């Protein structure tokens, strides 16, 4: 697990930053399992992203050409933009997993989860017809976004103080 430089032991690397068989063999069974799961999730989410992108391109392309899809129509815009936001959320999640595999970060950082939640909530706000939603539902979305923003800000402030 640790790299050796001229006979002295240096700081251990994370389970996911492996680039040689020697480092892999130094891992515990659980660390190997963790690396394998992160790799499989990355491949799976990548496949989902590829299929969703293909369907988005085909759907929008055919809609614009054959069905005279009007991108300025509010409902069409909400649907297409919602699909785009879903892809962006999946890309961000996959990007996070890539950092796990390369060892840039630990398993999942809370700040990253909060940012993904903010993206998902922004998607919900964009695709929702706020005139059709109840005031309580709209208020709940606003409070959730505010709470996520404050939480992210507090975590960033803490990280800045630790540096």
Image (cartoon, rainbow, N blue to C red):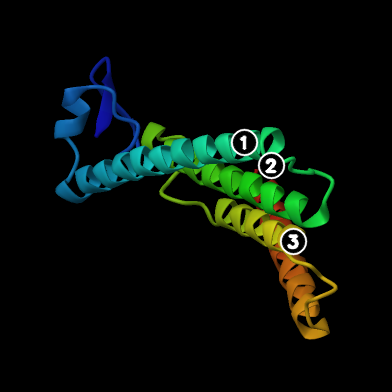
Which residue is labeled 2 in the image?
A: 67
Query: Sequence-wise, which precedes: disc 2 or disc 1?
Result: 1
Is residue 134 shown above or below 151? Answer: below
| Cα–Cα gap, marks 2 and 1 | 7 Å
Numbered tag placed on residue 149 in the rendering:
3
Which callout, 2 or 1, points to the residue nearer the camera? Answer: 2
Which residue is labeled 1 in the image?
A: 62
Is residue 6 shown above or below 96? Answer: above
Residue 158 horizontal/vertical position (percent): 67, 55
**Is any part of residue 154 visible from this angle?**
no
Left or right of residue 85, residue 34 in this image = left
Q: Are marks 3 and 1 in contact (CB under 8 Å)?
A: no
**Is any part of residue 114 visible from this angle?**
yes
| Cα–Cα gap, marks 2 and 3 | 40 Å
Left or right of residue 9, residue 86 in this image = right
Question: What is the quadrant of the N terminus in the image?
Answer: top left
Left or right of residue 109, residue 20 in this image = left
Mark 2 Cα shell of 10 Å, populated few (<14), some (14-19), many (≥20): few
Mark 1 Cα shell of 10 Å, populated few (<14), some (14-19), many (≥20): few
Element marked by disc 3: helix
Numbered tag placed on residue 109 in the rendering:
none
């Amino acid at each position: 697990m640790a790299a050796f430089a001229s006979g002295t032991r240096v700081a251990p690397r994370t389970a996911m930053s492996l680039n040689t068989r020697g480092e892999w063999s130094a891992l515990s069974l659980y660390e190997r399992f963790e690396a394998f799961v992160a790799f499989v999730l990355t491949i799976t989410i990548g496949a989902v992203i590829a299929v969703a992108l293909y369907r988005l391109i085909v759907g929008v392309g055919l809609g614009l050409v054959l069905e005279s899809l009007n991108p300025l129509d509010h409902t069409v815009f909400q649907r297409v933009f919602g699909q785009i936001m879903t892809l962006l959320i999946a890309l961000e999640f996959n990007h996070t997993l890539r950092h796990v595999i390369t060892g840039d970060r630990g398993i999942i950082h809370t700040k990253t989860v909060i940012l993904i939640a903010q993206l998902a909530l922004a998607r919900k706000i964009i695709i929702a017809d706020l005139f059709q939603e109840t005031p309580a539902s709209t208020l709940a979305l606003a409070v959730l976004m505010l709470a996520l923003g404050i939480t992210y800000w507090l975590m960033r402030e803490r990280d800045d103080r630790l540096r």
